[in-house]
Image (spheres, rainbow, N blue to C red):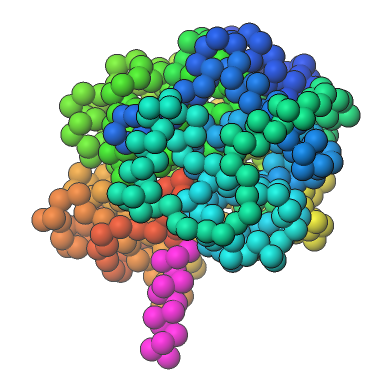
Amino acid sequence: MTSTDSVYLGKPWLSHYGDTIPHTLPTPSARHLPDMARQAAQRFASQTAFTCVMPNGMYGSLSYAQVDEMSDALARYLREVCKLAAGDRVAVQMPNCLSYPVTLLGILKAGCVAVNTNPLYTADEMAHQFKDSGAKAIVVVDLFADKLEAILSQTAIQHVVITRVPEFFPPVVQPIVYGVMKHWNRLIPAHGLKATRLPEALAQGRAAGGDVQAYVRDLKHDSLALLQYTGGTTGVAKGAMLSHGNLLWNLDQMLGMVRSHIDEGKEVVLTALPLYHIFAFTVNFLTMYRMGARNILVPSPRPIQNLQRALENYKITWLTGVNTLYNALMHEEWFTAFPPKHIKAAGGGGAAMHHAVVKHWEDVTGAPLVEGYGLTESSPVACFQPLSSGRKVDTIGIPAPMTEIRLVDDDGHDVALGAPGELILRGPQVMQGYWQRPEETAKVLKDGWLYTGDVAVMSEDGTFKIVDRKKDMILVSGFNVYPNEIEDVITQLDSVMEAAVIGVPDAKTGEAVRAYVVKADDSLTAEAVLAHCRSKLTAYKMPTRIEFRDELPKTPIGKILRKDLRAEVLATMNKKG
């Protein structure tokens, strides 16, 4: 501890809480996530919980009562038919669809642990996650059944349940949607898996009976609920162990920040981000389910036109997204000409929001685009811009209730006010550790503090701004250069759709700045981008090269993958010798 400790111990961010954000929170009243879900289903039984909307506008819906009954049936299937035990891991691999909430809640109601799996994984990535988690069962969408078949023998999976994107759609609509996917788009591969269809699994569960309340009788706040795989701050994909308590606390922390703008039972939230990702999982799924919202699920937001019918046909009041999603919407005439009329607020996260995108969004919609910060290891919400007056744009806002944050140097000492340092945090939402990886856990959890690998600065009033990922920082002639800053400058140009900045090896300066740009206007030139940068940036931050691309590599939620661009450069340099 140093003399600057008082800066953080004083928690200057509390001055922003005002009358709407609680300074402290009571221990969550729900004993576990199934308890929370059951309470919500009882309160909002007849209301629509989820509506899955296809690009052509066809849709299917489930009420809270239906989700509750179906997830009970799946819990009985897992325990009575599959003979799984409490604590067994069950993998979930599907895009946003009605099967997801039924499956996820069914797993938790069985007393089992859910393993969220990216449906776009390669067969090798699937094999790693399933073997590492020790999953004994899986509920998988038919779009990827062939990949599962290829690696199933390498895993401990004994039970396979297959679902479809239009599962639980009306009887007239379902075969039309499925037929288009199978015969017209040819998206559904042939496979030879021995599997049970999800509706049949539910039927078997209903027939088997079983006391669902007994399955969760021994669950507590510290019981494991979710293995959420992440690259984390270091290394290969690891399973962040999130307990029922971690997630319940994070629900209350999130609601502590925004509850003044949420009317129970009346919100309509657009979920374009995948539910298997922790951002949408906690914020869109769990938090909004607890509040009785109607969740509009979009199986895939790409191309961005896939959102058009959902935005036009439903009175969306909330939505979440990443910078690239909002940026794409701002370049769609159907959206900017007729923006949604009912949006209260939009939430941004996953990666830094660019100033130009936030301003354009707010000019078009009239609704605030509030940025937050978190990571898988913190369930994920750690910071959020308050929706009350005094919100500071271009920041990640302030710590959520019951969250402490410090900024430290490489030796773990607190940095001076206004100086950049690694953001470390602690609170009840911080994970238990990485599944079966004590050494990796020890690298990021130290004395109760989670070391995030993100570099931030704190202002005098306690608001935080992410400078960049520690590993993405570029060192030019001894000067620290942060890609976020340069990307933000470049995207201020109206003729720029997207930008990514990386450091590349340079014989003279150690590293040099290289920018990759996707044009919004074909007339844009490299000279124009450089001229704009010269007017905004000091010399050592200037890109030495502008490279235009038709698209940039991204994660499934739309975060730009700088590491892929770096790998491409290094591979090219190695070939040249």
- Which residues are drawn in magenta? 563-577
Whole-percent x, y for residue 450 in the image = 71, 45
Vertical comparison of 47 with 324: above or below: above
Left or right, 255 with reference to 473: right
> Residue sitting at 48 percent across and 19 percent down?
294
Residue 114: quadrant of the picture: top right
Residue 195 falls within the magenta-colored stretch: no
Left or right, 284 with reference to 500: right
> Residue sitting at 20 percent across and 31 percent down?
334
Vertical comparison of 106 with 541: above or below: above
Residue 71: quadrant of the picture: top right
Residue 572 falls within the magenta-colored stretch: yes
Please name whichever residue, 467 or 247, is drawn nearer the observer in this view of the structure.
247
Q: Residue furthest left?
A: 523
Residue 272: quadrant of the picture: top left
Please name whichever residue, 313 or 568, is drawn nearer the observer in this view of the structure.
313
Vertical comparison of 217 with 97: above or below: above
Left or right, 242 with reference to 216: left
Q: Residue furthest right?
A: 218
Whole-percent x, y for residue 359 in the image = 31, 32
Q: Is residue 429 visible to us here?
A: no
> Residue sitting at 15 percent across and 51 percent down?
521
> Residue sitting at 84 percent across and 38 percent down?
86
Please name whichever residue, 266 or 249, is drawn nearer the observer in this view of the structure.
266
